[in-house]
Amino acid sequence: AGATAKELGVSLSDIVNSTADFARLGYSLTESADLSKVATVYKNVADGIDIGTATSDIVSAMKAFSISTEDAMSVADMYNEVGNNFAISSAGIGQALTRSAASLQAAGNSLSESIALVTAGNEILQDPETMGTALKVISLRIRGASADLENMGESTDDLCDSTSKLRAEIKALSGVDIMLDEETFKSTYQILKEISAVYNDLTGV
């Protein structure tokens, strides 16, 4: 821990606390030490977050998208790359995905697609936390996940009572099919991308 703290220019307590947090999640001591480096690198590039938040953000992405310890640095790299080139910070991506990663993954989105949705939406909203919640709600509504929506305090009164009805409604309004086949939804990313191509031609209704 001391060597890592010196190497990355952070406090010893940050490394120890992050390592302990990962260990409590079931990672081995070696894995936890490696992951604490990832969280620390992310903290350093994210600006303004503490090591606890950095650890939580990395864990959310890893758990949701089944990312191995060996590939964990790719999460920090993606957050940093997008944060350097688009109108969202690395910390903002982490905030948004902490709220939405599990739902977006369940809806068939990859980590890259999820980051893209967060980044595009945040250009308008300039509020990563709200964007993360919005994407979670959108992905749940498309899939008709009424129990999850109710647990969030969201109204389900206007939720379609079947996937086939929602599929028919969206296709009639936009020409976009939300399903790959009778059993499989397209990813939220693919659905929104296809709708975006016809969005300017849609009526107010």
Image: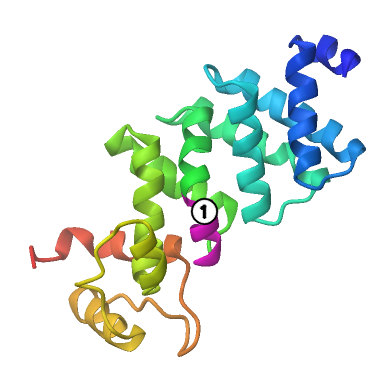
In the image, taking residue 66 as reference, residue 23 lies left or right, namely: right
Amino acid marked by disc 1? Glu
**Front residue of this view, candidates 125 and 172:** 125
Quarter of the rendering occupied by the N terminus: top right
Local secondary structure at mark 1: helix
Front residue of 175 and 102: 102
Q: In this view, does 147 lie to the left or right of 107?
A: left
Q: Where is residue 27 in the image (x, y as percent from the top left)?
A: 83, 45
State the residue position of label 1: 113
In this view, which residue lies farthest toward the left?
204
Q: What residue span does the magenta drawing correspond to? A: 100-108
Determine whether 137 is above or below 156 in the image.
above
Residue located at (28% from left, 37% from top):
125
Other residues around mark 1 within 10 Å, as few (<14) / some (14–19) / many (≥20): some
Q: In x, y percent, where is residue 141?
A: 34, 67
Relative depth, front residue between 50 and 121:
50
- Residue 24 falls within the magenta-colored stretch: no
Residue 145, given in percent of the width and then of the height, sits at 40, 72
